[in-house]
Amino acid sequence: MKYEVQENCLTIYLPGDVDHHQAEEIRQEADRLIERNHIRYVIFDFAGTNFMDSSGIGVIMGRYRKVYMLGGEVWAVHVNERMKKILIMSGVTKIMQIYEEEKTNAEYM
């Protein structure tokens, strides 16, 4: 996994498969970065992701709860059709925006 912090925005580049092993690592590192850098915006980049189970959905929801309390938001970018179906069916799209086109971190804020 790769993480990028710019000002108060954290981008998480998700791996090909997001299952319980990767989800725990993402959760720990994201929480550390959110607290250390006063993050208000979290962007999940799905460019290389083809699979996500319920633990991945839990990571998204947990990071949403963390930044929402600070007035922040959560977004998804580079979402393929398969992942979009998973996000819609899980109900996560009610708490996060899916951006179809690529934007820079500065454009999200």
Image (cartoon, rainbow, N blue to C red):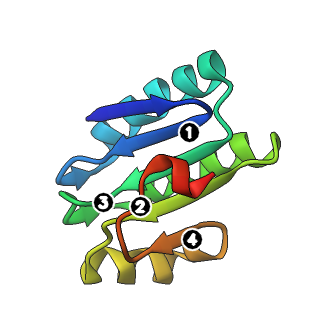
Alpha carbon separation for disc pair 3 and 1: 16 Å
The amino acid type, in three-letter code, at marker 3 is Phe
Q: Earlier in the sequence, mark 4 or mark 1?
A: 1
Which residue was labeled with disc 1?
A: 9
Q: Quadrant of the N terminus?
A: top left
Quarter of image, res 25:
top left
Which residue was labeled with disc 2?
A: 103
Q: Earlier in the sequence, mark 3 or mark 1?
A: 1
Alpha carbon separation for disc pair 4 and 3: 13 Å
Q: Are marks 4 and 3 in contact (CB under 8 Å)?
A: no
Q: Secondary structure at mark 4?
A: strand
Instruction: Point out residue 55 in the picture as x, y percentages from the top left corner.
Output: 43, 51
Residue at (28, 51) in percent of width and height: 18
Residue at (64, 32) in percent of width and height: 39
Q: Nearer the viewer, mark 4 or mark 1?
A: 1
Alpha carbon separation for disc pair 1 and 2: 13 Å
Q: Earlier in the sequence, mark 4 or mark 2?
A: 4
Closer to the camera in the image, 21 or 92? 92
Label annotation for residue 97: 4
Residue at (53, 48) in percent of width and height: 106
